[in-house]
Structures are given as C-alpha cells and as structure tokens.
Amino acid sequence: MELLCVRLITRRNPILSLPTYVKRHFRGPYRQTELTVKSPLLSSIELSGKSCRTTDSVRDLVCQLPRCQPRPSLLISTRTGLLPAKTPVTTLPAHGSVSLPRHFHTSSPLRAIPAPLLWLILKPLQKILAIIVGRNIRKWWADLPPNRRQLFWEGAWRRRWQLVAGTTVAVAILAVILLTHLDESPVTGRTRILMVTREDYMELAAITADGYMEQYRDVLVPEQDSRHQAVQMMVQHLALRNRDIPQVSSVSWRVHVVDDPAVNAFVLPNGEVFMFTGMLEAISDVHQLAIILGHEMAHALIEHAAEEASVSHILDFLFVLLLTAIWAICPKDSLAVLGQWIQDQLKKILFSRPYSRKLETEADEVGLHLAAKACADVRAGPVLWQQMELRGGAAVPEWLSTHPSHSSRATHINSLVPQALEVRASCTCPPLPSADPRVVFSESVRALLGNAKEPLPPQAASSERRRSPAAHALSGGMALLAPTQPGLLAPAPETTVILAPAPALTLLPAPAPETTVILAPAPALTPDRPPPV
C-alpha cells in the first residue's frame, strides 16, 4: 500500500509517473535494479510498516487514508503481471526518493530481412503493380467523353513547363542516386554501380549456400574422394598464392563437389565452391583446373553477382515505367502481353546479356592472372576453351547468350597469355616446359583431321569412334576444326569426327616443382594400324 501512496501523490504530475521513469531509464532484459522516484515536492516522506507522514498538508491527508496501512507483502504491478516484493521498502532520504527492486523482461530485437532478399521478393510484385496501374489508366481514358479528353490535353499543354520541370527534377534525383552509389571494382579498378552493401550481400550468399547444400546434399562427393581432394588442394593453392588480395585472404574457402554430369562450376561470394563432376571430366590437367577455379573465384572476389543485381534493379525500375505505358496505350490485353514480351526480349538482348558477357570476360582476365600467380601453365587456357568448343559449342548464338562463345573466349585468352606469362615469371615460379600446349593441341587435331580424310572400313571407323586418343577432351558428334596457327582454330569443310565421352578425372600425385603436365600429341591412326587399347 505504500506504493499506492506514492502513485496517488504523483498522479497529478506526469513527470513523477513511475511508468514514465521506468520507460526512460530502464535498460537490458531481465535486469534487477532499484528504481527511484524523485521529486522536489516530496520534502520528507517516510514509508515504513507503521506510519506515513509528510509535512505537506494535502499529502498528509492522502497518506492518512486507510489504504495506506501496511500489509505483510507488497505486490508491484507491471506489464508482465504482479510481482511480490522480496525486500522491504526502504526509507526515503531527505531529497525524497523511493527505491524498489524490480524484475523486467524485454523481448529480443527482430532480425531484419536482408535488402537483396527483400528486393527479390518484391521484384515480381512491381510488374504486377505496373500492369494493374496501366490497365486502369487505359480503362479510365476509354470511359472519358471526347470533350473531357480535349480538356485534359489542353490542361497538360498549359502546364507543360511544370511537367518539364518535374521530369527534370526526377532525372536529377536518379542521377544523384547513381552517382552516390559508384564504387571501384577490386583488382581491376573499374568504376561501377553497386546498390547493395557487402554485408547484405554476404548474408544473402549464406542463405543461397544453404539452399544449394539442401539441393545437392544427396549427390555430394565425399571428402575422401580423390576428385574432392584434387579440387580442395587447388583451391587452397590458389588462395595461398593470391593471399595479397584482401578479398581472397578474408574469405574462408570451402569446397563441395557435386556428382552431376553438367559441365558447370560456381563460387559464391562467401567462399563456397561448387564443382560438378561433369566439369572435371571436361578438363585435361591441373592447369586447366586452376584456370577454371581462378575464373570462378574472380567472380566472387570482384562481387560480380552484386554488381549484376544492382544493374538489374536499375533496369527493372526504368522498364517498369515502360511496362506501365505499354499497358496504358495498348487497346487490348493481348497486344499489351505481346508488347511486354517484346520489352523483356529487348531488355535481355540490349542490356542484361551484353553486360553479363562483359563480366564473364573480366572474370577470364582476372582468373588467368590468379592462375598465373599460382604457377599454372596459362598457355592451357586457350586449349581449354577449344576443347569446350569441340565438345559441343553453345546451342544459341553469342548475342543471345549470357556467356561469350567458346571460340571468342579462346581467342581473347590467347591474346592475354603473354601478359599472364610475365605475371607468372614475377612470382618465382619454376620455368615452363618448351612444349607449348597450344601447339601440341593443334598438332593433335591436325593428325586427327589427316586420318579422318582416309576412308576406313566400318569396323575400323567404329573402333576409332570408341578409342580416339582425344576422347579425354572431346565428346559428341560435331564438325572438327583445323588449326590455321598455333592456338587458333579455323573451320575444316567436309570433315566430321565422332568422339566418345570423356573419362572421369583421376587424382594423380602432385608433380614436383620442376615438372609440368602437358598434353601429348596423339599417334596417327591408319587402317592397318589399329588404335591402342
């Protein structure tokens, strides 16, 4: 009841309210503290088990009420319920204060949704909203009588300068937003637009990695498998040799090998490496493995995914306005759907896919330098993409693809080899062998083309298709290309060689620093000399 006296005294003055004091001064969950109510009006209040006295006549009358009599225990009212006071109420000092032990509970703060994830959720909704708004504008305009339409155009013409000023302000605001989100790309120093912070995107990458682990958990290769060990050793070697790059040394790289025939590999920004066994079957040696992993690690350390997502956000915002105009102008829904499809295709062909090919080309350059610093034979880079082309080139033209064609990548990487060799020489790497893998590959292809022109008996031709020496690099039926100069391939008319699928990559003992794995030339195949088994 003593607490009731204090509450009655302080009820007329909100400053003296106990809940207000608690709300202002309380910190932390489940903290036991002594709350003190102070007031200059309480000159000398003494709360004890027997009396309630004050020098003020009004408060003396309040404290002499029957409800001020003490009780064996004191219940304190809080938001969570009634709590018994374990200790007696203390006596107020001269300045007028009340100290009471209290227990409070506060809920833990909710975790915010990452901005990129929130954008991915809201991205489909903005198109739906644009369609609804555009369709309603079309129906509103169709219901207007001719005289109202005339008045609308006349009003728009009278306010033309206001409309121009509003458009200019909107463009200026968009320009300011873009300029304030400019960022310098690591390693390359290229200026780019980055709308997503690194913290948000790393959190989204962790969520994506969990999704991939859930998707591939039944087809992951065990860590004891030789293929997993080969990829893990190469990733560790690349990270060690490139530890001078902060984006490489600050990430903990983890390897996951997926038992899937797809020729694919990718690395998430948080260092999760996913390698498919189909890619391991498509490469020939550890040098090509280093180039593939260097390419994928370059995507991660340059944050290409975040950059591409940022550009996609800006394009989506601009094209949403265009989508609204399409649904507002087209007289029928069928025409609006056709216009929306044309808009999506133009967006992909003119903006999204060319930008994606640009990022892939940049990853090729940076990845080749990462492999060069790891002492890989960078001359195997053009050979890798020539082999990929012989396996079965891209099913769509390059201008419709998100990646450059294999022949374009082989030509571009071949032009970067001299610079990559200089980087390799500056990293105290062992000397390369005199045999150039590009020349060896070209001679092997020339030998195959020369033997393919000779007519073979049906049994010999069948045997050649099954046991071709280049089966480790080529697969499927396709037109083989003859080299015009080392490292480059040109079409050879009327020549077709069908080759067997590539065998699985086998983990071999790590070569000594002085040794290098290269491609050996294929032996000639003649009708009287069966191919080796």
Image (cartoon, rainbow, N blue to C red):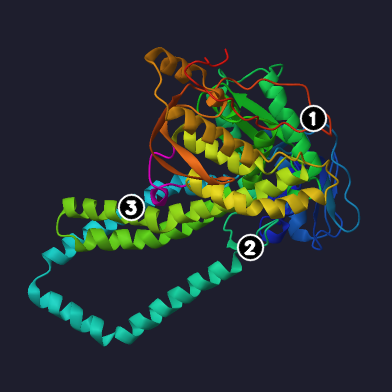
Q: Is residue 398 magenta?
A: yes
Q: Secondary structure at mark 1?
A: loop
Q: Quadrant of residue 164?
A: bottom left
Q: Earlier in the sequence, mark 2 or mark 3?
A: 2
Residue 356: image x %, image y %?
A: 50, 51
Task: From the viewer's side, name the closer residue of 88 and 494.
Answer: 494
Q: Main secondary structure of the magenta part?
A: loop
For mark 3, give the secondary structure: helix
What's drawn in magenta, residue-wise?
393-402
Which percent across, then down, holds residue 469? 56, 23
Rendering coords of residue 8 (x, y %):
69, 51
Residue denoted by label 2: 190
Foreground residue among 180 and 73: 180
Q: Could you tell me which secondary element the residue under label 2 belongs to?
A: loop
Q: CA distance from mark 3 to mark 1?
A: 81 Å
Task: Give the residue type that dot 1 points to.
Answer: Pro
Q: Residue flagged by tag 3: what amino acid is it?
A: Gln
Quadrant occupied by the N terminus: top right
Residue hosting label 3 = 345
- The answer to which quarter of the image holds residue 235 is top right
Estimate the spatial distance between the alpha carbons at disc 2 and disc 3, rounded to whole Å. Answer: 28 Å
Determine whether, in the image, residue 436 is placed left or right of residue 452: right
Is residue 46 toward the left or the right of residue 432 in the image?
right
User: Split into 4 quadrants, where in the image is the C terminus?
Assistant: top right
* Residue denoted by label 1: 72
Q: Who is closer to the viewer here, 484 or 134? A: 484
Label 2 crowd (10 A; few <14 / some 14-19 / many >=20): few
Note whether 384 is above or below 63 in the view shown: above
Q: Is residue 143 magenta?
A: no
Looking at the image, which is closer to me, 532 or 166?
532
As measured in the structure, the alpha-carbon distance from the residue carrying label 1 to the one carrying label 2 is 76 Å
Please give the name of the residue rendered at 13% of the width and 75% of the height, measured from the top-left corner: 148
